[in-house]
Amino acid sequence: MIMKVVEMGAHTNAAPIIIKKKKSGGGDGHHGGAWKVAYADFVTAMMAFFMLMWLLNATTEKQRKGLADYFSDSIPINPVSGGGDGSFGGDSMFSENAMVTTGTGGVNRRRADADRSRGSTGVDRQGGEGEPLEEFKTLEAALQGRGGESLVSEQLRKHIVTRVTDEGLIVELISTDESPLFETNSDRPTQLMKELAKVVVRAADMVSNGIAVGGHIRAHPVVLARNPVWELSTARAERTRVLFEGLGMKEERIQRVTGHADRKLTDPNPMAARNDRIEIIFLRS
């Protein structure tokens, strides 16, 4: 507001005239730009939420795990004392879990009841699903020929597919047109299946989890009056159990044997040889 005093003549006794000029401008709050910033943040958040939902629906579990691993911290931290004379006297902030002589966490050597009850499930203390235990990762790496000494030859590796799910570590033994697991329309294992069974049994010694065996077969090219897919898939799963136990696997480790017929195909072509497979699940305890 601008005030201006208009002076009168020097010889008059009249009061001075004051003129007030009120300057307007700027507008009310709703005419400003602050709401645009808030709206832009909201739209950005909704777009991020949409992208998240789309990714969850459009990716496989293995791809989602890869994305999570990409953003996880990859800086190794060694909890064992380095013997220095710094602020922590050579110990790290994790020294309560370290035993310098053995390099093994002292807390892990005297596990609490809550930790003991977790077993090989990978379940955290809050009851949620956690990362699979290191044994599962080591087992998967051995079956895929990654890391150290492999249990699998290059020829056998082409017939093994692994993945980790909520149920446990799934190992699939798959057939090809040139190398089937069983003789045609029977449960008699080929030499390839016998070799693969040896690999699985040797690998199973790395963990103590229970095992489930499932048989899957491809669809028949013609409609039969009596379709044998259920009986044949169950017979192959049962024959696999017998193979495992004959190779030294303990009977009590096998929790179930199931025939799935041609109901769960991995190849879009129902008659593809890849659909002839044996599924071994190392169950979460």
Image (cartoon, rainbow, N blue to C red):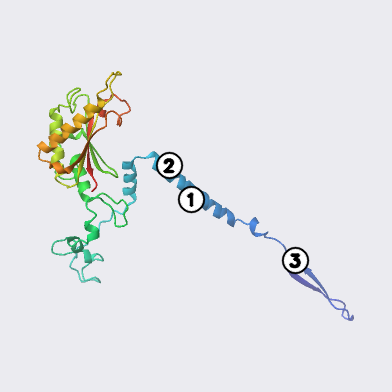
Q: Which label's residue is closer to the chain start, 2 or 3?
A: 3
Residue found at the very far front of the displayed protein: 226
Closer to the camera in the image, 14 or 138: 138
- Report whether 12 appears left or right of 179: right
Q: Which label's residue is closer to the chain start, 1 or 2?
A: 1
The amino acid pointed to by label 1 is Ala
Residue 29 lies, in percent from the top left, at 64, 59
- Report whether 204 appears left or right of 15: left
> Residue at 70% across / 61% down in the picture?
25
Query: Element at badge 1?
Result: helix
Closer to the camera in the image, 11 or 217: 217
Residues at marks 3 and 1, CA–CA distance in whole angstroms: 43 Å
Whether tag 2 and tag 3 are in contact, CB under 8 A, the answer is no
Q: Is residue 148 above or below residue 98?
A: above
**Residue 19 visible somewhere in the drawing:** yes
> Residue at 42% across / 45% down in the picture?
52
- Report whether 182 appears left or right of 270: left
Residues at marks 1 and 2, CA–CA distance in whole angstroms: 14 Å
Q: Residues within 10 Å of mark 2 (few under 14, many from 20)?
A: few
Residue located beneath label 2 in the image = 54
Residue located beneath label 1 in the image = 45
Residue 76 lies, in percent from the top left, at 25, 56
The label number, if any, that marks residue 22 in the structure image: 3
**Residue 153 visible somewhere in the drawing:** no
Residues at marks 2 and 3, CA–CA distance in whole angstroms: 56 Å
Q: Which label's residue is closer to the chain start, 3 or 1?
A: 3
Residue 159 lies, in percent from the top left, at 20, 33
